[in-house]
Amino acid sequence: MIDLKDLAENPEKYRASQRAREADEQLVDRVLTADAERRSALAEFESLRAEQKAFGKKVAQASGEEKQALLEGVKQLASQVKTAEAAANKAQEQRDEIAASFPNVIIDGIPTGGEDDFAVLKTVGTPRDFSAEGFEPRDHLELGEILGAIDMERGAKVSGSRFYFLKGVGARLEMALINMGMDLALRNGFEPIITPTLVRPQTMRGTGFDVEHDDEIYRLEKDDLYLVGTSEVALAGYHADEILDLSGGPLKYAGYSTCYRREAGSAGKDTRGIIRVHQFNKLEMFIYCQQEQAEELHEQLLAWEEEMLQSLGLAYRVIDTAAGDLGTSAARKFDCEAWVPTQGTYRELTSTSNCTTFQARRLNVRERVSDAEGKSKGTRSVATLNGTLATTRWLVAILETHQNADGSVTIPEVLRPYMGGMEKLEPIQR
Ligand code: AMP
């Protein structure tokens, strides 16, 4: 939820944000109109209520015929108050609904435009030149099959397209990657946490998902529960309706969960292998912090993601996502895209978003504030951030980048301790 007071004071900032997102600029005025209507309906209700009270006193003091006449008026007023109350409630609901549809206000200076308008902030590492090495790289699925690591066919048999089995060294590699990421998170003060993957509608909405219209989300109708597409949802909901003590620094969680995505709009895209699947695993960093710390921590989340990518020997670039390609909750988003040799292009492996106070307002996560003398000044919203440390998709870049001509894959050194010291994945069939 945006800050409605700020919107009323700085409507132009919100109009500019909407323009940068290529979204409806007039939403600003609709929120302002709905808020004015809410205030006037509330004022009408309160004034009628005051009149009703005063009238009540008059009636109490009257007697006989005068009282009878006044009682007629009481009835009329009561009905007017009831109507005004209903109107005030409706106006409040309408204002809340419009305000809830307003995406987060972007951070000034990020690229404007849509999916293709990102800015490349940096490129790290050099894509491996297989032609110089004299062999044609195999794609991750071919490698996965000859290593006995990925089984798409049986995935499809059991669950349908975009499902798969990770087995043998594939299963081990994924666990190694997640454990390595978890160790990085632990070294940096994150608390490990395994989250629920089914959440209530209010948690989904609070995190910024439009549950009624979002085709990406799996829903369990009978139970009114949603399957999360990321543990960010459960982690954002974790402290809902709480007042946090951030005096000792930000709260940092490293959440592990399975993620489910319908990929409804992706027909025909990435149909081969595990790059775009309905179910994958993810290690996600999630931070609750003070508003002023959010931008610096966002850079820090990106740095941890980069540390992970670099230690695995992957070539990648960092992009600053354009406003129109941000999710509803994000004010800024950096993606790390790793080089996928057989695609000859960079593909997104991580994503880190600064959601400023947007999610915290919706989920009512606050902190106490006090003045310089320590006198309480009430509460205010905290900020939330999230960032990917590892997902199943990382196997694609690792397998393809570190493959050898004979179909084996050299395990990056940092992963070896998590693979029982194994140095290479060897083909089980050719
Ligand atoms: P997102 O939460 O959409 O930013 O995604 C975070 C990360 O999850 C991406 O950077 C990918 O590594 C991974 N990911 C997203 N969607 C899929 C998918 N359908 N299949 C496999 N991995 C995915």
Image (spheres, helix red, strand yellow):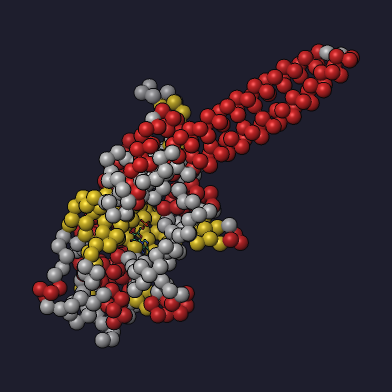
Where residue 379 appears, as percent x and y from the top left, is 45, 31
Task: Residue lying at the far right in this picture: please name it.
Answer: 64
Work out whether residue 414 can be spotted.
no
Query: Ligand 1 shows up in which quadrant of the image?
Result: bottom left
Where residue 57 appears, as percent x and y from the top left, is 76, 16
Q: Identify the residue shown where x is 80% and y is 16%.
A: 60
Q: Identify the residue shown where x is 37% and y is 74%.
A: 166
Q: Identify the residue shown where x is 74% and y is 29%.
A: 79
Where residue 145 appears, as percent x and y from the top left, is 31, 80
Work out whether residue 28 can be spotted.
yes
The image shows residue 421, relative to residue 1, as above or below, that is below
Task: Residue lying at the far left in this picture: please name it.
Answer: 132
The image shows residue 183, relative to residue 3, as above or below, that is below
On screen, residue 391 versus residue 37, left or right, reads left
Is residue 395 or residue 29 the one in the foreground?
29
Number of marks in picture: 0
Q: Identify the residue shown where x is 62% and y is 32%.
A: 88
The image shows residue 371, relative to residue 398, as above or below, that is above
Where residue 35 appears, as percent x and y from the top left, is 52, 32
Q: In the figure, residue 45 lies in which quadrant?
A: top right
Is residue 368 or residue 229 the one in the foreground?
229
Quarter of the image for the C terminus: give it: bottom left
The image shows residue 241, relative to residue 337, as above or below, that is above
